[in-house]
């Protein structure tokens, strides 16, 4: 094959490529992704710390066993179960209403001085 035929074939191929590119229109460019993505992301808000108060309480053995079983079987902490139960008890009630309700159910101090 002569050099002139090879050049002609290349020109024809280049011409066809240019025609195809013209039909397709401009090719979209991919966005440049920064290497440090964390620099562009907003920082999450700092978690708020909740003040905790530690208490020790004695509970009836039956209730204590149910509490431990529930915590174990459902992968919960005993303290969160107690905390949410107390929140339910105090929600939308005054301390007076809670005390009156507990006394009506037979609640009293366990130790007398």
Image: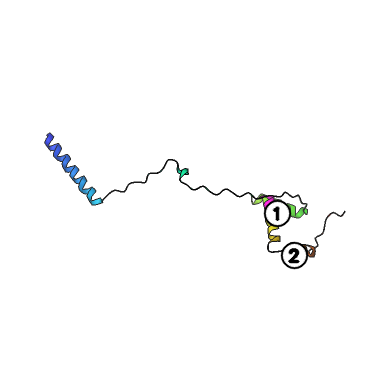
Say few, some or many: other residues with alpha carbon within 10 Å of mark 1 (under 14 / 14 to 19 / 20 or more).
Answer: few
- In the image, 28 versus 85, the foreground residue is 28
Range shown magenta: 77-82
- The answer to the question of whether label 2 and label 1 lie on touching residues, with beta carbons closer than 8 A, is no
- The residue lying at 25 percent from left, 51 percent from top is 24
Please indicate, yes or no, whether residue 1 appears anywhere in the rendered image: no
| Residue on which the image places disc 2 | 97
- In the image, 9 versus 52, the foreground residue is 52
| Residue on which the image places disc 1 | 82
The N terminus sits in image quarter = top left
Q: Which of marks 2 and 1 is nearer the N terminus?
A: 1
Q: Which mark is residue 70?
A: none
Percent across and percent down for residue 16 are 19, 46
- The residue lying at 16 percent from left, 43 percent from top is 12
Taking the image as shown, residue 91 lies to the left or right of residue 34, namely right
Percent across and percent down for residue 113 are 88, 53
- In the image, 23 versus 38, the foreground residue is 38
Taking the image as shown, residue 46 lies to the left or right of residue 84, namely left
Callout 1 secondary element = helix
Percent across and percent down for residue 83 are 69, 54
Say few, some or many: other residues with alpha carbon within 10 Å of mark 2 (under 14 / 14 to 19 / 20 or more).
Answer: few
- The residue lying at 20 percent from left, 48 percent from top is 19
The nearer-to-camera label among 2 and 1 is 2
Using the numbered discs, state the Cα–Cα distance from disc 2 to disc 1 in whole angstroms.
20 Å
Q: Does the magenta stretch include residue 81?
A: yes
């Amino acid at each position: 094959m002569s050099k002139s035929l090879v050049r002609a074939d290349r020109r024809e191929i280049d011409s066809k490529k240019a025609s195809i590119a013209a039909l397709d229109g401009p090719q979209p460019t991919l966005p440049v992704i920064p290497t440090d993505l964390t620099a562009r992301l907003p920082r999450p808000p700092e978690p708020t710390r909740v003040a905790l108060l530690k208490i020790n309480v004695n509970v009836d053995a039956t209730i204590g066993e149910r509490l431990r079983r529930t915590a174990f079987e459902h992968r919960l902490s005993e303290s969160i179960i107690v905390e949410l139960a107390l929140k339910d008890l105090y929600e939308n009630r005054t301390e007076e209403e809670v005390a009156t309700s507990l006394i009506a159910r037979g609640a009293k101090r366990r130790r007398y001085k």
